[in-house]
Amino acid sequence: MRDDRTRIGWYYWGMQETTARSAIDTFISAFNASDDSYVTALLAQALTSDVVFWGPLGRSEGIAAVERFVLDIRRHPAGTGTMVRCSAVDMPDEWARYQWVFTTPDGGPRLTGTDIVHLRRSLIDQVIVFAGEVRPSTS
């Protein structure tokens, strides 16, 4: 019996991780959409309508707020960049984290970071963006 519960637990965890990875990759794909008109539809596939987004400019709510952020990034002064998930998805229960990199054309500015997301019913309902590297402690 214990072996069955362990197998079921691992199966459930694997399904959760696959679901999280799908939502995260769809969210990231909004940054790379071939046209601005696709951004809303991609975000709606990845986020809850009441998503809470903690970004570099503070807290905002709803898909429209996240869409504004994504469109601002897409209109980077150095040119349309590319956002890529550059790590595995680490998911303890309903929270997940992953690392990303944003690059602009022709060797322009590059930004890295880590996002923490919370999932509810297979969709992201909270995003916390940590942009940049964490500096080592000086003490």
Image (cartoon, helix red, strand yellow):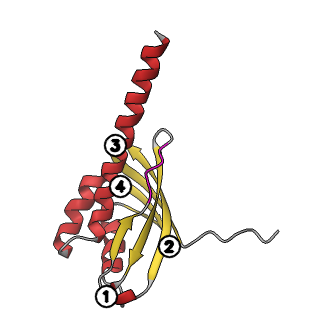
Looking at the image, is mark 4 or mark 2 earlier in the sequence?
A: 4
Disc 1 is placed on an element classified as loop
Q: Which residue is mark 2?
A: 56
Distance Cα–Cα, label 4 vs label 2: 19 Å
Report whether 31 appears left or right of 14: left
Q: Amino acid at mark 1?
A: Gly
Q: Hey, which quadrant is residue 4 in on the image?
A: top left
Q: Between 101 and 24, which is closer to the camera in this rendering? A: 101
Q: Position of residue 137 (x, y in %)?
A: 75, 68
Tell me which numbered mark, 3 or 4, is placed earlier along the sequence.
Answer: 3
Q: Quadrant of residue 87?
A: bottom left
* First to last magenta residue range: 87-91
- Residue identified by numbered label 3: 18
Which one is earlier in the sequence, the residue at label 3 or at label 2? 3
The quadrant the C terminus occupies is: bottom right
Name the N-terminal-most of marks 1 and 4: 4
| Predominant secondary structure, magenta span | loop
